[in-house]
Image: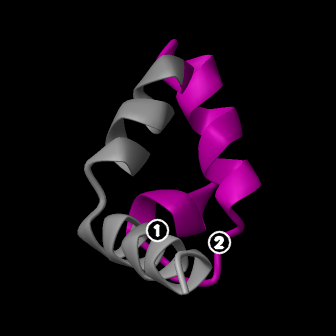
Amino acid sequence: MNKVFAGDPGVAIGTYLKVMAVLGMESNFAEMAAHDEVVIKLQNIKLLEGSK
């Protein structure tokens, strides 16, 4: 757990989801992902590749 709170980049996403669930914030994960600029760009690239 110390790695989570220290911001260690090696922590698995599942660990963050467990922490968010304990804090009652698991529904916030989808909201955060929806506003992630990198994810949005990757989705747009995938959509563009599919339209060729």
Is 33 left, or right, of 2 in this rendering?
left
Q: Which residue is drawn at 48% across and 36% down?
A: 29
Which quadrant is the N terminus positioned in? bottom right
Q: Find numbered disc 2 in the image and state the secondary structure of the residue it sits on.
A: loop
Q: Would residue 24 be counted in the magenta stretch?
A: yes
Q: Nearer the viewer, residue 48 or 30?
A: 48
Identity of the residue drawn at 71% across and 51% down: 15
The extreme front residue here reads 52
Name the secondary structure under disc 1: helix
The residue under label 1 is: 43
Q: What stretch is highlighted in magenta?
A: 1-26
Name the chief secondary structure element in magenta: helix
Residue highlighted by disc 2: 11
**Of the residues shown, which amino acid type is indicated by label 2?**
Val
Is label 1 in contact with label 2 (beta carbons under 8 Å)? no
- Please indicate whether residue 45 sits to the left or right of residue 49 in the image: left
